[in-house]
Image: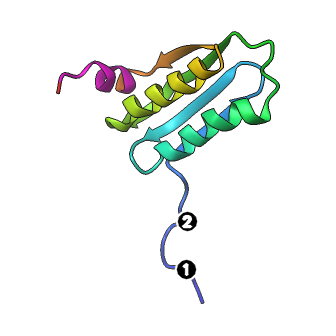
Amino acid sequence: MTSTGPEKHSPVTIFVDGTSGISVTGTLDATTIAELNRSVTDFFEVTDTSDLDMLTLDLSTVSACDHAVSAAVRHAQSVCAERAVALRVVPSEAVRQVMTARH
């Protein structure tokens, strides 16, 4: 049987650097946000973070997002607060627009 459609790829790529943080590229929306939330939680469960005082959530290469990005940042803030670690968010223009939009 031959495939007739293009191969499906995730619209988001998440890179976890065990020493400093998490970088996200692509699209963050309701369909991909769970993957980011899981990565944030796993970062602290899998990585030795005893010397970590700040987690960087690098969203500077997020090309598109919706309001779900706000929930993801709140999730990261909560996880960091539980561990007494500061959170630094580096937003892309798309993220900045969603985060500052008035609803």
Q: Quadrant of residue 49?
A: top right
Q: How many marks?
A: 2
Residue at the spot x=63%, y=35% of the render? 41
The numbered dot on residue 12 is none
Residue at the spot x=69%, y=9% of the render? 53
The percent position of residue 22, horizontal first and vertical second, equals 63, 28
Q: Is residue 19 left or right of residue 1?
A: right
Q: Is residue 14 left or right of residue 64?
A: right
Q: How is the image coloured?
A: rainbow
Residue at the spot x=56%, y=32% of the render? 24
Q: Badge 1: how crowded within 10 Å, few (<14), some, or many (20+)?
A: few
Q: Which residues are magenta?
A: 95-102
Amino acid of disc 1: Ser
Amino acid of disc 2: Glu
The percent position of residue 82, horizontal first and vertical second, equals 60, 22
The numbered dot on residue 3 is 1
Which secondary structure lies at badge 1? Answer: loop
Q: Where is 52 relative to 67, above or below? A: above
The percent position of residue 45, horizontal first and vertical second, equals 74, 35
Q: Badges 2 and 1: C-beta atoms under 8 Å apart? A: yes
Which secondary structure lies at badge 2? Answer: loop
Q: Where is 9 relative to 74, above or below? A: below
User: Does the stretch in magenta take in 61?
Assistant: no
User: From the image, which quarter does the N terminus lie in?
Assistant: bottom right
Q: Tell me how far mark 2 sits from mark 1, CA to CA.
A: 9 Å
Residue highlighted by disc 2:
7
Q: Quick check: can you spot residue 72?
A: yes
Q: Where is 44 relative to 83, above or below? A: below
The percent position of residue 27, horizontal first and vertical second, equals 44, 41
